[in-house]
Amino acid sequence: MHFGPEEIRRAIARTVARRTARVALYAVPANPTPGRDDLRGTGVVEFSTRRAWVSDRLVTRRGLETSRRRGESRLLRRLKRGIAAETEFYFDGGRRYVCGPDGAWTSDGADPAGAMSDHHPSWPLHILSGAHGTPALVEEVNDAVGKTLVLDAEVDLSVAQAHTPHPLGVPPGVFGDGAPESASGHCIPARAWLTADGHIWRVSVASRRHLARPRDAIMWFASEFVELGEPVTVVPPGLATEPRRT
């Protein structure tokens, strides 16, 4: 069975055309396929507006368990438990807001029309459009969404930008000043799960650390998209009403 990069890009286009989705976020050490203990958070995305509202945590359940098994100090484990608590994030295009402990939202001040941050839950999906060469069929499985094809691909960040209608951010400190055009010729591994009806269910991409130091163990970041096309409304913070998910 042969799949080229154009088949992957068509699957991305079909997914984005559904306009909305619920999303689950994962951080997975060494393996692109996430498990339950790798869950970082959940939320909603609005592909048409580049908006998203998600919960996220810096340390997953697996990370806490690994810390315990390694015999790390009580102080370090306590610190990790503190940052394992969920934090709410709101993305308005290129701008990111974070909800503080007091419930107040603060912005990073970036231009909403600017580049989509690699922290955005839709970033892995758009980066996948940079697939080139011949993606490798890993396996055909029955997952939570039914029959899926699992494909491995090399993703060129400059190719991704050329196939995406809006600017994509690249990890800071990796390609000079971090501008998208400075990513030309740099590739990262990715894995995609294609559903029987031709949508992207899950995509997993290598971490920024791997980009900077390819010989290091890879940490994978995955986004899962379900309930495509379901009604979702995201109201920007700082207006008459606080941001909300429906």
Image: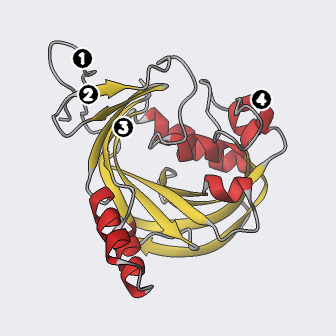
Looking at the picture, tell me which residue is in the foreground, 168 or 214: 214
The residue tagged 1 is 238
Which mark is in front, 4 or 2?
Answer: 2
Mark number for residue 181?
4
**Count of numbered badges drawn on the protein:** 4
Can you give x and y, in whole percent of width and height, for residue 50 in the image? 44, 28
Can you give x and y, in whole percent of width and height, for residue 48 in the image? 43, 26
Q: Secondary structure at mark 1?
A: loop
Can you give x and y, in whole percent of width and height, for residue 170 in the image? 65, 38
Q: CA distance from mark 2 to mark 3?
A: 18 Å
Q: Secondary structure at mark 3?
A: strand
Q: CA distance from mark 4 to mark 3?
A: 26 Å
Amino acid type, label 2? Trp
Q: CA distance from mark 3 to mark 1?
A: 19 Å
Amino acid type, label 1? Gly
The residue tagged 3 is 45
Mark positioned earlier in the residue sequence (1 or 2): 2
Q: CA distance from mark 1 to mark 2?
A: 7 Å
Can you give x and y, in whole percent of width and height, for residue 92 in the image? 40, 25
Q: Secondary structure at mark 4?
A: helix
Mark positioned earlier in the residue sequence (2 or 3): 3
- Crowdedness of circle 2 by 10 Å Cα count: few (<14), some, many (20+)? some
- Crowdedness of circle 1 by 10 Å Cα count: few (<14), some, many (20+)? few
Position of 145 relative to 115 (above/below): below
* Rendered-image quadrant of the C terminus: top left
The residue sitting at 40% across, 55% down in the picture is 25
The residue sitting at 57% across, 65% down in the picture is 219
